[in-house]
Image (tube, helix red, strand yellow):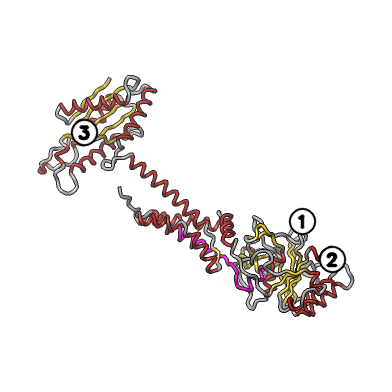
Amino acid sequence: MKRQPLAWRYRLLLALLAGLAAAAASHGRWLGAVDEAIFDHYVARWSYPADPSLLIVAIDEASLQQIGPLPWSRSVHARLLDRLTRAGSKRVLLDLPLSEPDRHPGADAALAAAIARNGQVVLPVLAVPARDGRLAEERLPIALMTANAAALGHAEVHVDADGVARGIFLQAGIGSAHWPALGLALADLPERAQGLPAAEVHAGADKWVRDGYVRLRYTGPPGSVPQVAYVDVLEGRIAPASLHNRRVLVGSTAAGLAPQLLAPTRRHAPMSGIEYHASVASMLLQSRTLRGMPPMWQHALGAMLVMLCVAGLCGGRAATILAISVGLPLPLLLSWSLLRGANLWWAPCATLGTALLATAIWAAWRIASWRRRADRDPLSGLVSRPRFEQALQQETCTGSGECRPLALVRVELDHAGGHDDRPGPQAGDALQVAVARLIAAHARRPRDTAGHLGGGFAMVLPETPPSGACQVVEDLIADVRRLPWEADTGNARPTLSIGVYCRVPGPGVPADAFLHGAEVALRRARANGGDGYVLEAG
């Protein structure tokens, strides 16, 4: 039988419910971990050359061996900064702990003077979280250095729950997001970069507030941002031309000193914090920022795609095929296309998961529908012969175990062929359907079964004695006699011939005995002229 699509009002209702479910899943980030895994897969090999103006001056193992263990006197950093100033470096980020005075006399003043001479130094602001009853605080460099700095930036490295650094808040601070990220301060863009607002912007005045979240697009493999050793710059072993007009990041890369961060593109080669800030600056300088889709649009787009998919599933065959073949892979394809083509991240898993769930429910419903159709006669709507015989076998076993009577009723229309000569829909078919409905109405108990057997019908009536079976049959005959009938058609009034076989099942009375006994009783009823029944009971 050809499958008919659902009515439009039901399709719209189901589509709306599925869309609301997708929006709720997106809002709640129920599949957030899977979304991040997909994002990591999309960007794993999607790298680009670092901005050529960037250079890392690394406090590495070689520098520690030649200069000594940290902390170094700030006069050492002053000498390094003067080297960069004389070479004509464009901007310098000193990612160093500067919030406490140096223990070496005159070292702070020397570094402050070097910062003033350079005029383009960016210094870090550290966030100290609230703990032990103390409020959160910002740790700025000492006032002597802050006064001479070109800019201050927050040094927070944002790491997701799984330990991967996928993004950064471009602004942060206590009470309000007033400090730019170090990478943003180093880039020194004409227009301040903006990201998505975060919930933390409404925090209290004593909270560390974040704003402007963007996802990071990292540069290539380790070493994509050029690095030189701190000691080599300090001792003049790096040509001034290599430092001229460069944005220089000074910070630690030595193992055990620098935090080791995981990135989607570098799961097997952790990076230091200074490399993280360099990636931020490179991304901003080359306008390669990956922005997340605003939440409202994220939820709305997902809901719309799911609604279209569900509407297609509930439609005709062509719409269903289109919904499965196009609608299911579309969220992944759209997410990838937006990321690569527009630098816009749209998390697809809430949409994909809801669409897959809807498809699974639809498939289960279709399979159940096909099974129901396989068990039913397409004309009468009663159960088919295999299903009827299965029910008879089951009730025979049950009746035998409980020693309760079982009745089998065989029903045939008298003169059914005389109703097949009218034009249009076959009158015989219409009568068969009408009688089948009456038979189904009389097999009303949960365990009663009405079926279509060959050219007739049958009923299994569990726990029914002969008197009860006779009452059901007499009521059925009376109802058939009351069916509408037009005498001028030349057709005989519809009547029934019925055979009833009633016994307590047992070893000597199997299921086949009931079929045979009811068939014999039916032949006797027909031999009696029809329009009646014969009961075989014992």
Residue 352, image x and y in percent? 49, 56
Q: Is residue 309 left or right of residue 88?
A: left
Which amino acid does the dot numbered 2 rest on?
Answer: Gln
Could you say whether the residue bearing mark 3 is in a helix, strand or loop?
strand
Specify which label sits upstream in the sequence, 3 or 2: 2
Residue stretch rendered in magenta on the structure: 279-307
Q: Which residue is mark 3?
A: 412
Q: Is residue 372 left or right of residue 191?
A: left
Image mark for residue 132? 1
Is residue 487 in sight in this rendering?
A: yes
Q: Could you tell me which residue is drawn at 27 percent across and 36 percent down? A: 452
Q: Is residue 295 magenta?
A: yes
Q: Could you tell me which residue is drawn at 18 percent across and 25 percent down? A: 524
Tag 3: Cα neighbours inside 10 Å, few (<14), some, or many (≥20)? many
Q: 69 or 507, which is in the foreground?
A: 69
Q: 270 or 538, which is in the foreground?
A: 270
Residue 70 position (above or below residue 376): below
Question: Which mark is nearer the camera, 1 or 3?
Answer: 3
